[in-house]
Image: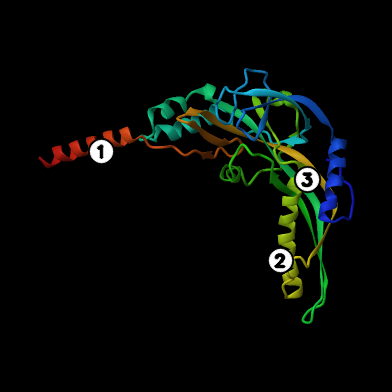
Amino acid sequence: MGEETTQSAHGEVGELLSRLAQAEGFRETDLYYRPESDYRTLSLNGSPMVDPFTGSTEVRRAHGKVLRPYAVVPPRVSRAQALEIVGKRLRWSWLAPGRIRREGRREDNLRGVLIPFWTFDFTAAARYPSHAEAPGGTVQRHFKDLLVPASQALSQEELQHLRPLTLESVQPFSGHHFSHFYQEHYSLDWEEAFQQAGRVAQRRLERDQREASGSYALPGQLHMTYSDVAFKLLLMPVWILAFPYGEGHWRALVDAQSGRLQAEVPRSPLRIAAWATLLLAALSYLLL
């Protein structure tokens, strides 16, 4: 997104970010959500709407204004490959409940989702005061492609599963290239995201200040300023296999770049009992 040079305190960056967002442009679209959820999705394929994160069909529609995505990371793992990755895991999960083993291999339970991230470029400077043992000064560092997740649909553990992200292959976003995907609407806006990015920058500059001066600046003594701020809405593809299960849902996450799988497969007490019975019978037979 367009870059603009400014020298400002943290709270003043919000106005700059809003101007950059207006310059990038918004579009009107339908947003879909479950009543109890904190996130929204856009259907890019026009098919009957299902919540891609849970498999629930109890989805409502609203109309909203969303920022146009700047870029997307194209998937390297196909739909068929993702289904095979989940299926292989379930084939070796002998103690998994039968319903999970069956539903986890169904292609219609697998959906592609574009997960939103903000990426920031900026220069941060921290001025620190002098004291009896060391003079004051300024430390400065440029941050490029500092990523902040904008999703509330995935847990922090699942978001960490998507990292490290490969940004070298990003391409301009075009909806028709991802007509078989859903897109999650950002739950964290650019101002809130920059606050997180600013905290990352401040922690790094605190370390730089200690190395430069050989002393610790007390909390609140660093005066932070930011310049050359730019940001983009970046979408990352992921394959999610999800369906209602018990009182909630079960899902498996396949990173569409690396093919890494994240899935917690429960164990069936009935299957555990059955395998234990078989093992005991086999041992009894061998001992006779």
Q: Which mark is residue 288?
A: none
> Residue 276 appears at what percent x and percent y?
25, 38
Q: Mark 1 or mark 3, which has the lower sequence index?
A: 3
Q: Is residue 158 left or right of residue 282?
A: right
- Amino acid type indicated by mark 2: Arg
Q: Which mark is residue 207?
A: 2
**Nearest the camera: 105 or 136?**
136
Name the image quarter holding the C terminus.
top left
Q: Residue at x 68, y 33 (%)?
A: 74
Which mark is nearer the camera, 3 or 2?
3
Pointer 3 residue: 191
Pointer 1 residue: 276
Question: Height in image: 88 above or below 8?
Answer: above
Cα–Cα span, label 1 and label 2: 55 Å
Q: Is residue 49 left or right of residue 208?
A: left
Q: Is residue 27 left or right of residue 41?
A: right
* Residue with the most extreme bottom position: 132
- Amino acid type indicated by mark 1: Ala
